[in-house]
Image (cartoon, helix red, strand yellow):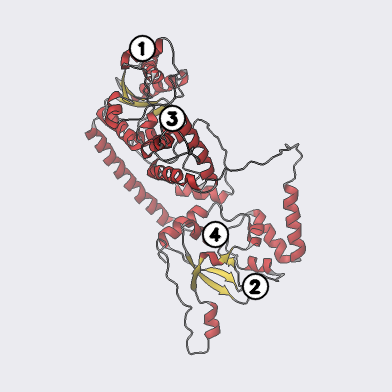
Amino acid sequence: MDCNTTPRRRQATKPGRNGNSKALARYAVEFVPIDSITPSPENETIYGPTEHDTAMENLIDSIRRKGLAEPILVTGDRKRFILSGHRRYYALRRLDHKEVPVRVARDIRRKGNDEYHRELIEYNPQRVKTVGSVLRETLLRDNDTADTYDAIQERREAAMTVDADFMTVAGEKEIEPISNKQQEFLAAVQQVINQLRYFWPVTIRKVHYGLVSLNPRPFKLTPKRSKFNAAHYRYKNDKPSYNALVRLLKSARYLGHISMTCIDDPTRPQKTFGGFDSVLEFVQQEINGFLKGFHRDRQQDQPRHIEVFGEKNTLYNEISRACSEYYVPFSLGRGYCSIPVWRDIERRFRESGKERMTLIVVSDYDPSGFALAEDAIRSLRDLHSVPVDGHRVAVTREQIEELNLSEDFNPVKEEGKRLNKFIKQTGDDKTWEVEALGSQYLVDQIKAAIEANMDMEVYEQVCAEEEDGCEELCRIREEIASQLEF
């Protein structure tokens, strides 16, 4: 079965004339809508959650490349329950298949079947199981089914009981519905987010600047009598419009109108800790990564050490995409940086063995953006003795005029000498944020600045050598695999 196409419905295999029609019918395969079959609830009790099984990604990749090797076995109930193939079922759902191949065990039913747990176990003998799953199987196979099933449920409920004083939280948090009058606004938001799909997750600020040119109507109601014309109530580059966007995005994500993963807040970092569910999972990871991941240092033979510095965390996606191709290191600040940032940049410069360094800066067109770009150069040059040349690639006056960028709707935060210096440099106190630039445009600007400081012939040669090295490692992996015997 080609996993990239929707399979056509097939009829069951026609029996021959040798009297084996019933035997053949037992093995007949038919294609049915995926919504017409149902996972067995008992399966999760025995084996644990299947949809997020650690082996699921490998199975999805296998089906995507090779198709489905075995059909799903279902019961003879009217509401067909899965006997064998829960992982395959969830994998096909993830791959958005509308129909699935099934074999129907017409003599097995879930409804009214006291032995159904045992039937499930018998049809899953080859499954890779945890110690807990094996224990549950043994208990269910060798003892009274009903009593053992109840014991497992009791054990799970007991495991959820902890000795702690939990909060008592009153009230209920509700999601604001999206009215019919907001559908134009929602459609415009969806359009902008889809255009930015390559850069997901994006910030709300990035979506805001994308909406300014579309000019939808963001507000639920407009007064019937008003001294303003209709344009006054459409989306603008101002605080009320931005706040309306924040509210709509909250509702749209919870109500399923846009993906939960398309918006992120990089100003609030998170940290998680993982591990392995079994030795098998660890070994599989190590084998999959064996002799993979080789790459050359694409900056090793370049005449200059190059780094990129971004003013804020919200620039991570664009700067990362621009730098990764050339293996150029980058740093992100939240305004002015502390000593460890400059210390680490100096260390990388010293280790590179280069004579000079280029620091490419991305910052807002405002007093702080100008000042921190200069502060970065002074910190490296004067306090860390790094011979550095600064190149501020965004936001510039040329970009503002060329792209007719929308200025920042927030008032200038700076006062005193820094603001006066900014006005003297630019001619007024108007400011522009980096987010006003298109994401791909910003990536291209950073790439152009990187390449301007590189010897591109040397770079192409290193990439060619890296490709040759990877091909040689693939041959070594194949040779080692062919010698292994189990």
N-terminal-most mark, 1 or 2:
2
- What residue is pinned by disc 4? 87
Instruction: Indicate the quadrant where residue 460 lies.
Output: top left
Number of numbered discs visible in the structure rendering: 4
Distance Cα–Cα, label 4 vs label 3:
49 Å
| Dot 2: element | loop
N-terminal-most mark, 3 or 1:
3
- What residue is pinned by disc 3? 238
Would residue 397 be visible to someone looking at this image? yes
Query: Does the CB distance between marks 2 and 3 fall below 8 Å?
Result: no
What's the amino acid at mark 1?
Lys
- The residue carrying pointer 2 sits among few (fewer than 14), some (14 to 19) or many (20 or more) residues within 10 Å by Cα, namely many
Distance Cα–Cα, label 3 vs label 1:
26 Å
Who is closer to the viewer here, 86 or 460? 86
Who is closer to the viewer here, 104 or 436? 436
Distance Cα–Cα, label 2 vs label 3:
62 Å
- 236 sits left or right of 150 in the view: left
Distance Cα–Cα, label 4 vs label 2:
20 Å
Who is closer to the viewer here, 123 or 157? 157
The residue that appears at 53% across and 86% down in the rendered structure is: 20
Query: Does the CB distance between marks 3 and 1 fall below 8 Å?
Result: no
The residue that appears at 40% across and 13% down in the rendered structure is: 418
- What residue is pinned by disc 1? 421
| Dot 4: element | helix
Query: Does the CB distance between marks 4 and 3 fall below 8 Å?
Result: no
- What residue is pinned by disc 2? 109
Q: Nearer the viewer, mark 3 or mark 1?
A: 3
| Dot 1: element | helix
Q: Nearer the viewer, mark 4 or mark 2?
A: 2
